[in-house]
Image (cartoon, grey):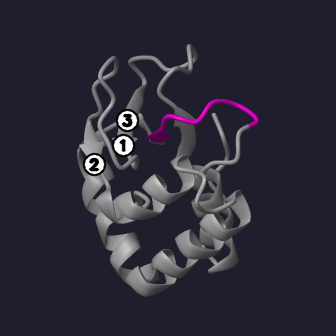
Amino acid sequence: MKTSYFGNRKLGPGHYLVRISAYPCRFKKSDAFAGLLAPPRQLLADLKAGEIEMDEYEKRFRKHLYSVGVPAIRQQLAEAIAPAGNREPVLMCFCGPGQSCHRRMFATWWQEQGEKLIPEL
């Protein structure tokens, strides 16, 4: 499993795209959706409106992940990627390279919980 962004040109038929963004992508179809990993819409709205800074966003997103819990996330990921077959699952959102992003925040948090490292594609 890896993480990436919808505009990544490295994505191909060997990848199984699992959307973890709050909103669907208009230009690239996802194969599955893992909604527990999407940031709450209000949190995203607060960030976009400039009401909170990125450090507060990360704090609140991590709080969201803790409230959901590892077992529920593990189960949802397993269900989302089960149909992948031989394709590599990729957790997808919109943020491009070098941007602070919830997909990388999740990957870091996931590893801190004792789970496998999820590298960027």
Kindly indicate whether the residue at mark 3 contacts the one at mark 1 (C-beta within 8 angstroms): yes
Q: Earlier in the sequence, mark 2 or mark 3?
A: 3
Query: Where residue 24 appears, x then y in whole percent?
Result: 29, 36
Q: Which residue is mark 3?
A: 17
Which of the image's four quarters has the C terminus? top right
Query: Where residue 103 appears, x then y in whole percent?
Result: 56, 51
Q: Secondary structure at mark 1?
A: strand
Q: Secondary structure at mark 3?
A: strand
Q: Amino acid at mark 2?
A: Phe
**Which residue is depicted at the point 64% across and 74% down?**
59
Magenta span of residues:
92-98
Q: Which mark is residue 18?
A: 1
Q: Is residue 96 above or below residue 52?
A: above
Q: In front here: 2 or 54? A: 54
Kindly indicate whether the residue at mark 2 contacts the one at mark 1 (C-beta within 8 angstroms): yes
Q: Amino acid at mark 1?
A: Val
Distance CA(mark 1)–CA(mark 3): 4 Å
Residue 3 falls in image quadrant: top right
Q: Which residue is mark 2?
A: 33
Q: Is residue 3 above or below residue 56?
A: above
